[in-house]
Image (cartoon, coloured by chain):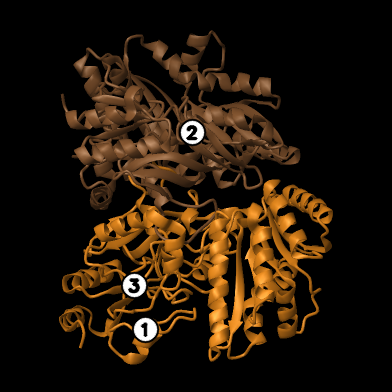
Chain colours: A orange, B brown
């Protein structure tokens, strides 16, 4: 078997924590994206940082690849094992270690999910804002620089991480930062590991910022005659500095998909879903300013709610879009695109993308974390149709080229993984050489999540 | 002469832009801190990124050290040339290249000062918030991860940099990021260069976030019976999420120094200087909430002003503290300390520091960007008194040890330079090895600002 000596050493150290069974390996060799499953040779269920350090040290000695695994909810093949190796599953490392209420920060193990953290915080008046669409671990979220619907106000994982405990490729345990809110002490290792996708080391613990739950929250929806009116409203909202907590756009096809899937009767028009938070007077002011803006751009059918039940009801359509889109084409392969552009270019970028989709055989819904300039298309293609699969790939490439030309990025929040390595090359040009130099310096034998992020 | 071949090649390329004159070299071999001047062998006045790239390529070929120089306002010997070499002065690169008002970002050359940028923005309704205490270049501010009084609300340079143009050690020009507000594309090179202190390459251009000038601004002062009452108020203000724009603390000795220097009659008590910004209703709400909080902690003599003249008058004492402290001991050497701790520990940290100072022969004022947990002491010692100089050094070391033990950092905003390399080792422990590995990977011949940041 491959890596026989490494596996023997791992078995001697970890006994039942190590699995060589095919079902376990297969379950860890694929994520929620459309990438082909590539199982590792073995799966370790880590219980502690010490476990991770010992495992990485053994793998390092025998040059066995190491693939860190949280919840497996990535979309670009981040957890696949194209060269085999050891998958270290951190999902059992679920301890919330220290809550500092005064400092509004928390120390967690990497396997704690964002949902578990927020459940723990519920009666403290604090919350953790980053909310990707799935039940994912905080370690995985840091590793992929995840974001979600709250990023327009609170930022992404990049802004929430104060410090990380990391097991380096030699099996040493380091701390990248401190709990201080700012520091000018040396190279910024925390931000180097946030978004490093497991290619430089394994994140085992995190110190994260928390935020006070606003005194008042309110949600709203607003419909528009066309996409441009909606994106103009978003642009003005951001430019005016209205501190929206969320501002999400669904196109008319998205609303149609939701209606068909859930039996609802939402108006089938481009729709903004909003959330406001602050003091009671502040929220009222935000709503009034936004309403004026939206009306002046052609917005209509504006509704607001300020109790939790009605807020949740309003957001239901937004949250169900992925499954509603899936239901439009049973058996179809899904690809979710993820470009992000400066907000002044968002309208053009979405309209040109819409044009491309209309001229293609591909069915797709469009939605956006539009306050960040980030939007997704959820494209459906028949996996048995070479034409449809090629068209879907071509559409994605065209979107990425356009976003880069507009001063944007090939991925706002999903990361590179296996799927976007060519796009990274397009976007970064000669800067890619520095990423390779750093990778080689910190992982000289190339054992950390090989085949990811950096093009071969 | 040292580096003779390099100098010959530089002269052939740069003619009058290159100076070998001692006054020019001496002027570039020291900063505004107390470190001994160490002049470079030559000074290049760069006019373009191309100049910088060509100069670094020549230096790289001949292994001549390169020291990037902005305004020379650093405090920890960042611009000294302990091994000689070429200082590249970027202060003539003063073009503001592109303003994107809708996106609230701007592209500038590295030599633009923060003051010049804000003068340019004055009639656009936008401003750049990071405000260290001197007239410094934006390139230098990025290189040292600078902050200032606005960081509590707007963050430091770390939060403002969207992307950097950098000349690498081989003389290649790269771009670290994009103008998109978020990205999950690859390693975070922008944050790697922010705070790298010229040790990895030369920053030549910056894309920076801007912010809308708040509709209303108001300033306030509030006096307290003791330091603890003041720091308790700060802690509660931050924890309640009051979005103060500035919250600065001066101890009673600071106020006494200001009174003596400026002939004013400010109440000699620990004093918070505040600024609020937002909508008119929002600012009123902030002031009301803050006032309740301050009163409940023992605050008194609270005054507010909402016209610019009165705001400036109030802040005058704060801005003059450095010179007021200097005037307390003419001819004395000044050392400014710069620890930053989690806000829950700020009160203890300042009180214990006060105790240390009282038990020493050193005179010092204390002030803090206290909303960030960051405070300075401005210490005065007679340079001819070995006892005073040793006591000052011991006090600084004790403060740094304490801050690290409290979960904080040896430098909130001044950086490591030559002066804090040992402190970086104390703070980072085994993580320092990764910084060294990155340094070696990106600067294999060690030509970029040698003798800075990393301990020998």
Residue that label 3 marks: A451
Q: Mark 3 lies on which chain?
A: A
Quote the CA–CA distance across marks 2 and 1: 50 Å
Q: Quadrant of residue B425?
A: top left
- Quarter occupied by residue B247: top right
Q: State which mark lies toward you, 2 or 1.
A: 1
Q: Residue at x 49, y 49 (%)?
A: A102
Where residue A295 sits: x, y (%)? 83, 55
Spatial distance from mark 1 to mark 3, Cα to Cα? 11 Å
Q: In this view, does A88 lie to the left or right of B387?
A: right
Position in image of residue B321 (x %, y %): 47, 19
Quadrant, the C terminus of chain B: top left
Percent position of residue B372, x then y: 48, 40
Q: What element carries label 2?
A: loop
For the point 55% across and 27% down, the residue is: B116
Q: Return the residue at label 1.
A: A38
The residue that label 2 is drawn on is: B148
Q: Is mark 1 on a helix, strand or loop?
A: loop
> Are circles 2 and 1 on residues that touch, CB within 8 Å?
no
């Amino acid at each position: 078997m491959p890596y026989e000596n490494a596996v023997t050493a791992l078995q001697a150290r970890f006994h039942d924590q190590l699995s060589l069974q095919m079902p376990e390996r297969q379950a860890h060799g694929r994520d929620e994206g459309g990438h082909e499953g590539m199982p590792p040779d073995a799966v370790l269920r880590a219980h502690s940082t010490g476990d991770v350090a010992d495992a990485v040290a053994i793998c390092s000695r025998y040059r066995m690849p190491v693939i860190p695994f949280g919840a497996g909810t990535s979309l670009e093949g981040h957890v696949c094992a194209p060269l085999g190796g050891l998958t270290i599953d951190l999902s059992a490392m679920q301890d919330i270690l220290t809550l500092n209420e005064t400092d509004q920060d928390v120390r967690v193990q990497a396997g704690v999910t964002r949902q578990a953290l927020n459940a723990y915080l519920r009666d403290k008046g604090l919350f953790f804002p980053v909310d990707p669409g799935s039940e994912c671990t905080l370690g995985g979220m840091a590793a992929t620089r995840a974001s979600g619907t709250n990023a327009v106000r609170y930022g992404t994982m990049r802004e929430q991480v104060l410090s990380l405990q990391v097991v380096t490729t030699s099996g040493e345990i380091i701390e990248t930062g401190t709990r201080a809110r700012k520091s000018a002490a040396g190279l910024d290792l925390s931000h180097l590991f946030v978004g490093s996708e497991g290619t430089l080391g394994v994140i085992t613990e995190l110190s994260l910022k928390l935020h006070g739950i606003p005194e008042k929250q309110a949600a709203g929806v607003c419909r528009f005659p066309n996409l441009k009116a909606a994106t103009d409203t978003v642009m003005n909202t951001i430019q005016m500095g209205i501190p929206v907590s969320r501002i999400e756009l669904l196109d008319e096809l998205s609303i149609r998909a939701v209606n068909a899937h859930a039996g609802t009767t939402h108006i089938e028009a481009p729709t903004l879903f909003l959330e406001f938070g602050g003091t009671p007077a502040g929220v009222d002011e935000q709503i009034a300013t936004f309403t004026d803006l939206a009306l002046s751009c052609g917005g209509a059918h504006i509704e607001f709610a300020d109790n939790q039940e009605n807020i949740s009801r309003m957001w239901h359509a937004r949250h169900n879009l992925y499954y509603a889109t899936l239901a439009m084409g049973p058996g179809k392969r899904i690809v979710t695109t993820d470009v992000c552009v400066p907000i002044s270019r968002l309208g053009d970028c979405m309209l040109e993308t819409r044009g491309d989709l209309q001229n293609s055989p591909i069915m797709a819904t469009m939605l956006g974390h539009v306050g960040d300039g980030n939007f997704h298309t959820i494209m459906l293609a028949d996996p048995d149709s070479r034409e449809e699969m090629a068209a879907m790939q071509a559409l994605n490439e065209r979107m990425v080229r356009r976003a880069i030309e507009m001063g944007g990025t090939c991925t706002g929040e999903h990361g590179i993984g296996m799927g976007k390595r060519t796009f990274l090359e397009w976007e970064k040009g000669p800067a890619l050489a520095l990423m390779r130099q750093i990778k080689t310096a910190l992982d000289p034998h190339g054992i950390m999540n090989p085949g990811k992020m950096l093009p071969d």
